[in-house]
Image: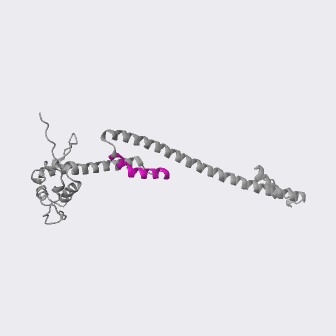
Amino acid sequence: MTKPRPKTGERRAVNQPLKIDRLPQSARDAIKVLYDQGRTWKEIEEQSALGFGPDWSKPPYDQGFIDWTTIDSETLDLFPGLRVAKNTLHRWFDLRVRQVRAQVLAESAKARKWAEAFAGKDLPGTNAAVMNAMRDQVFTLMRQVGPGDQAKFLDGLNALSLTLARLQRVELQAKRVEVDSRKLKLLEEREEQQRQQLEAETEGAARKLSKGELTVEDINRLRERVFGLPPVEAPEAARG
């Protein structure tokens, strides 16, 4: 039993060459231009049989868009009457243009969605730079690999995403260590200031002691700051 011919919008199981594929690129581009301008397939068929002219894309569309004199004889045999039938135009456009455009949009949306999920939020600066570059390349890479390789490609990217996630954790830990180091440095600076202040007070008390000028207030200041002891009271005679 013969397998039914694919309908409009249906993909072919095997990508076989089409008649229009044998025409020059300029002719294929002209078909897309004329269709996008609103011309019907019947009108494009009729115009394909006209004599070639440089103003084929301009009203009243009285010039042909294919220079049949430059086409090889084998290709000419595919187009009786030197015209492109509307059914041939329709099928070629559906397979080569409409379906490709739809696939590009679908894969572009898929790539954007994947890249957004892959990127996450609040990445450290280095990771963000990597991700910005990857967002620009994901879609291009997906288009370059074949359908059978896309699963492996995505597996590789997912593995890379895990690596970047680990890198993110390492960078966060490094930032915590940096913060802790700054705190430790501040404590060391504070302790150094206190040590210098105690040394100054001790030297001052020693000078007063050598001159017989050491007071109870001086002693209490040393007791409190050096030894952490409570102050002592001055003798009654000294207070009187």
Q: Does residue 124 appear in the picture of this structure?
A: no
131 in the magenta segment: yes
In the rendered image, residue 154, in percent from the top left (x then y), is placed at 37, 42
Report the magenta residues as a range.
123-143
In the rendered image, residue 146, in percent from the top left (x then y), is placed at 31, 42
Residue under the point 77% across and 55% down: 198
In the rendered image, residue 78, in percent from the top left (x then y), is placed at 14, 48
Classify the position of the N terminus by image quarter: top left
Residue under the point 80% across and 57% down: 201
In the picture shown, does residue 90 fall above or below 156? Answer: below
Characterize the magenta stretch by its predominant secondary structure. Answer: helix
Taking the view exactly as shown, the residue that stands out farthest to the top is 1
**Colouring method of the image:** one colour
Q: In the image, 42: left or right of 10?
A: left
Q: In the image, 205: left or right of 177?
A: right
Residue under the point 20% across and 48% down: 95
